Amino acid sequence: MEGLGNRSYLAGGARAAVVVDPPRDVDHVIAAAARRGVRIEAVAETHVHNDYVTGGLELARLTGARYLVPAGASVAYERVPVVDGDVEDVDEGLTLRAVATPGHTPHHTSYVLEEDGHAVAAFTGGSLLIGSVGRPDTLLHIPLRESYRGGEPPIERHCFVTTPSALSPDQAADRLGEFTVIDVRSPVEYATGHLPGGHNVPLDRLDEAVEALKTAAAHAPLLVVCASGARSAKGCAQLAGRGIEAAALEGGTNSWAAAGYDVDRPAGSPATWPMDRQVRLAAGSLVVVGFLAGFAWQPAHWLSAAVGAGLVFSGVTNTCGMAAVLSKLPHNRPPKNALSFQETLLRLTA
């Protein structure tokens, strides 16, 4: 089934946290905990998942955390079996209580985060979803705030979404009116054709737009879009790190248009290639030039080597200096009638 996703949560207090339904790639979960200065005290699974590979066991081994798995689940690895009513300590005044919720699977278990005995958040896995049943791509997201104590300022606690969902073009089209669409391509790419109602917030300026995006997300869920899906996935990860929930469009505008859905293109917009295609052309051309010129002047071969090294660096760091340079060229400048970045932010907060 297209569009299957998972919601993973990092939730806790000032010193320790629990991770619920962790993704396969646990590095960014560990990084998120490190950024917030908390240790991962426990890892909890709501059920044995058949639609994605969990990273729970690996995360528990790497962090030394207790690995909580429903007792009714048939597994071959060591874990802490939990049943209805079991309570695990997370942080001072914070506990995680297991609640049996069979249905999605026979052993399905939800978890309630309690602060000083009061329920403040619920992690319901595949048993209770928003707007659907049995789909693991949306979950409850409740911000928590510690009460004012001892003259110290309040400490804000959150259930952080760590694994953004992805929607296929068909799924996004069915629900497009529910979303605030954020297009993270460059302004000139955006002008060549974008999803109806989309707002242009380039990926390299996403941090500047955090407050506006938080305001927008409070009114409607965010759908992040790019040309092929790579930049939108990165944008969703950045937003998740700021506590902003967002979904990505699988395949980007390329798949959207290929599926026959309309794109908006302002009059007078340039017919410019997507930036990734421009980068491929420029890099390939420089490699060929360096190779051929090397027959006449051998040091020219170093041009090809330099481009290759640049591409390796780009892949390792997930950045692209060549794209940054190309974006400054005249043909990549946005049309004169394009909204400014500040105007876009004002629209997002309106």
Image (cartoon, rainbow, N blue to C red):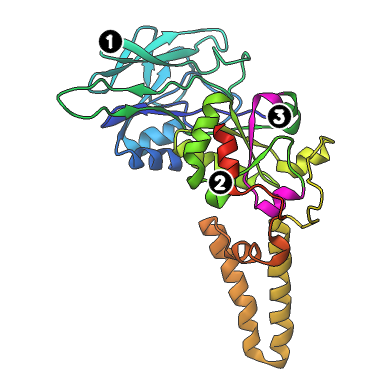
For mark 1, give the secondary structure. loop
CA distance separating discs 1 and 2: 45 Å
* Picture quarter with the N terminus: top right
CA distance separating discs 2 and 3: 27 Å
Q: Identify the amino acid type marked 1.
A: Gly
Q: Are marks 2 and 3 in contact (CB under 8 Å)?
A: no
Residue at image position (69%, 55%) is 334
The quadrant where residue 232 appears: top right
- The residues colored magenta run 175-192
Q: Nearer the viewer, mark 2 or mark 3?
A: 2
Reading the image, the residue beneath label 1 is 117
| Residue 340, position as x, y percentages in the image | 61, 49
> Looking at the image, which is closer to me, 84 or 320?
320
Q: Identify the amino acid type marked 3.
A: Ala
Of callouts 2 and 3, the N-terminal one = 3
- Up the image or down, 23 lies above or below 144; here it is below
Crowd tier of the residue under label 3, counting other residues whose Cα lies within 10 Å: few below 14, some 14–19, many 20 or above: many
- Taking the magenta stretch, the answer to whether it contains residue 181 is yes
Residue furthest to the left in view is 150
> Looking at the image, which is closer to me, 229 or 71?
229
Q: Which label belongs to residue 342?
A: 2
For mark 2, give the secondary structure. helix
In the image, taking residue 273 as reference, residue 244 lies left or right, namely: left
Q: Nearer the viewer, mark 3 or mark 1?
A: 3
Of callouts 1 and 2, the N-terminal one = 1
